Amino acid sequence: MTPLLWLTLALEVLFAAWVVRLIWRTEQVRPTEQIVPATAEEVELVG
Amino acid sequence: MVEADATEDALVGDAARSQLPLSHRLSFWTNSFILWGWVLVLSSFLVGGLVGKVFPLQLSMPIIFFGTLCNAIIGVLIGAAAARTGYSSALLFRYAYGRQGVLLPNVLMGLTNMGWFALILNLTRDGFVAQVGAEPGGTVWLVSTLILGALFILPAAVKIRWIAYIDWFAVPGFMAIFLLVLMHVLSGAGGFTTLWAKWYEPSKPIFIGFDMAAGGWLAGVTIIADLARFWKNAKHAVVGIMTAYVGLVTVQYWGGAIGAAHTGEWNLFLIAGALGLGILAWLALWFGAQSTVQGGTYAAGLAFSAPPIPMVRGQEFTRRIATVGVGVLGLVGSFIGLDRFAMWWVQFLSWVVAPIAITIIIDYWAFPEQRSRYEKTDGADMNLNPAAFVAWIAGFIAGYYVGGNELWSGLLSSAIVAGVIYYAWMRLAFAHGTTPERQLFGTPKETA
């Protein structure tokens, strides 16, 4: 493994951490419970 | 009232044509077992073994991690979108591809799953027939094909919860046999450090190793919405998908690479058989096959029961009919050579699937102002999105040319080309307050 490849791998790990943070923050700003119906009675069919 | 609620629940079922309501979601552990069962399969060891044959362990292990982490990133981005919206892959894809255009990714992914069904069914059946010493083409061969095929279809057709019931024992069973074989291989090889120090010249460039490792599960993470939407929120999806891909898939690939570094070949089933594990070896093969193919059949059933396919007697009935239909297709396919088609098709799969995955990710995550479309059932505002189709074609050509000629990673090339085209065209359309479809074909009123 060359230093360039280790650096690429490290950057990928950092990118993965950023992706997790993005999803976490999106979920905190607008939680899933506010988006999807709570029960079967509230479900609307996709047209 | 209670009766009416029960009827409503039964009609919604696994929500093939609507958002999955919170009341129908599964616990973190139940859904995690479903995903873990989905990723544990013999073919993962074969991919790891293939990388391990080409690269020594000092290279193959980091390359594999690079590839599986790439799968995990794609998986969490699509899986989180699915958990947040409650949509299956087929419903999620229609926002980017359009209400009619969604047939392209649905048919591609559905048929790919059926190819895997036929291939894995034949491998498992052949293993059983060899185990009991029966004649290929005889009665035992025929009956075992039908029984194994029916077992793949049944849990998928009934309800996702039945897939979990099987995975509660298939996952620990598979892992126990895998660890037993791995420990035996390591002790026979003189320990991990001996294998790590063993060096041989790589016969391919490193990016080809990455394509092998990341390509193995790319189709699986692209349709991960079908399973990920059963988690209660996106945080659960992130943890579950990360444990599956960074954890279990990496360990399986590494196991395959370790086996290859020691023996030059790796096939869990063959090695377990050589160890004298007998029927236990076949059981490991079946655990992996059952837990994966039932998930694939379930996903293909969802793909062929979503709009624009017409609904028959409610969304759950439509899903069940479609699941049995695609299962029977896979079963018949195992007799007529669909497995050979799957082996041929797999060489193009990364370039076919990577543009689809990147398009969905960009559509949901790169345009926050448009994300709200996904929360409305009529939010897919195009019949056919030309931006998604042009991006897919250009991505495929780029992957085919770059990967086919081993110039660089075909998988990354196809994703980058498709991603740039899709993002640029959509951004341009949004800036003008329109859609790519209206830009090309005009509104229905203008064209009338």
Image (spheres, rainbow, N blue to C red):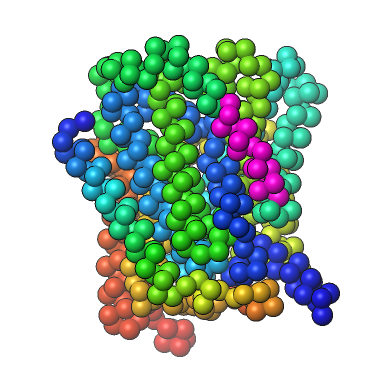
| Left or right for B15, reference B192 | right
In-image side of B175 versus A24 (left or right): right
Residue at 65%, 79% (x, y): give it.
Answer: A42
Magenta segment range? Answer: B162-177
- Residue B48's x, y, as percent? 42, 30
Q: Nearer the viewer, residue B232 or B206?
A: B232
Which residue: 27% across, 23% down? B202
Q: Residue at position x 33%, y 31% from top?
A: B61
Residue A2 sits in quarter: top left
Question: As rendered, which of B168 and B302 lies closer to the eye?
Answer: B168
Residue A46 quadrant: bottom right
Q: Is residue B348 magenta?
A: no
Q: Residue at x 40, y 23 (%)?
A: B258
Q: Position of residue B223 (x, y in %)?
A: 51, 53
User: Magenta region, mostly helix, strand or loop?
Assistant: helix
Residue B416, image x and y in percent?
28, 54
Left or right of B308 on screen, residue B80: left
Q: Is residue B446 above or below residue B76?
A: below
* Snapshot quadrant of residue B391: bottom left
- Marks counted in the figure total 0
Q: Is residue B163 magenta?
A: yes
Q: Quadrant of the N terminus of chain B?
A: bottom right
Closest to the observer, B372 or A25: A25
Classify B346 as above or below B232: above
Is B44 above or below relative to B351? above
Q: Tell me where residue B18 appears, x and y as whole percent.
A: 61, 70
Report the side of B65 relative to B281 (left or right): left
Kindly tell me whether residue B127 is visible in this rendering: no
